[in-house]
Amino acid sequence: MSNATQHPEPRILASGDTALVVEFGREVDRRVSALVLALTRRLEDAPIAGVVELVPTFRSLMVHYDPLLIAPADLSARLAAMAAGLDAIERPGRLWRLPACYDPAVSPDLADVAAATGLTAAEIAALHSAETYHVYMLGYLPGFPYMGDTPPALRLPRRTDPRVKVPAGSIAIATAMTAVYGIESPGGWNLIGRTPALMWDLRRDPPALLAAGDKVRFEPIGLAEYERLAAQAADGALVLSPEPAPRIDLVPESAT
């Protein structure tokens, strides 16, 4: 009989000569993410001398180390021991409520998404903002959060013609993921809104607003409110604070 603590043994792989990767699975899902984050917490609570950085990803934890301070074989053994007995439980974390404007003026792909899904613009905004998203990882760009899981009705492929410039704060969807562009950059995701919240701001410490394991809800606002808050953000006056997020026990699919 399956239970919530059963999972495959992690694999420990070399990544160059200064990093090891602890891989927990081959699929992107919340249980695997919970294991990645559980090991991250263990290493943060009981640091290993010589480890210089932890980078959680969808399916694995990359552990950067100084080979002059710890040998890879010794680190691998330590990581294997610390990865044993982890539970696939989403621990209480931080819940962010991000203002989100779905007005067509800041949502250049809204009409295309509506045509592809058969939904109205209002239905898209309502569906997208009804979810509590899980931050799987940060990557691609500074402060860029990969968040799941987008409602099935909104799951679309990336655009066939990526844009050269996507404005910072653009709320985007592609496949089962939702993201927010932290800086202006090229991008090929479907843009359905924009938030005045700054995902990446060098005036903060740390600069990234979100972190792996956070939860996010988008709170719809009108265009005038977006413009007001965006002006505050540009001046460094828009300060957002997280709320505690509830613990969620993840049950394996085979047990449901």
Image (spheres, helix red, strand yellow):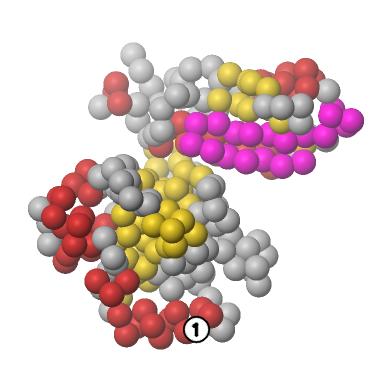
Could you tell me which residue is drawn at 47 percent across and 70 percent down? 197
Badge 1 density bin: few <14, some 14–19, many ≥20, Cα 10 Å: some
Is residue 77 located in the magenta-colored stretch of the structure?
A: no
Left or right for 38, reference 82 = left
Magenta stretch, residue numbers: 52-70
Q: Residue furthest right?
A: 68
Please identify the quadrant where the C terminus is shown: top left
Instruction: Give the answer, above or below, for where 74 lies relative to 244.
Output: above
Towards the viewer: 2 or 156: 156
Instruction: Give the answer, above or below, for where 102 lies relative to 173.
Output: below
Could you tell me which residue is drawn at 49 percent across and 59 percent down? 185
The residue beneath circle 1 is 232
Horizontal and vertical percent position of residue 73? 78, 18
Is residue 220 visible to the viewer in this orientation of the structure? no
Left or right for 24, reference 78 = left
Instruction: Give the answer, above or below, for where 131 lies relative to 91.
Output: below
Left or right for 247, reference 158 = right
Horizontal and vertical percent position of residue 217? 36, 60
Left or right for 41, reference 251 = right
Please identify the quadrant where the N terminus is shown: top left
Q: Secondary structure at mark 1?
A: helix
Could you tell me which residue is drawn at 72 percent across and 36 percent down? 64
Towards the viewer: 68 or 97: 68
Is residue 77 visible to the viewer in this orientation of the structure? yes
Towards the viewer: 232 or 97: 232
Instruction: Give the answer, above or below, for where 95 lies relative to 256.
Output: below
Horizontal and vertical percent position of residue 220? 29, 70
Could you tell me which residue is drawn at 24 percent across and 71 percent down? 104
The quarter holding residue 109 reads: bottom left
Callout 1 amino acid: Gln
Is residue 57 located in the magenta-colored stretch of the structure?
A: yes
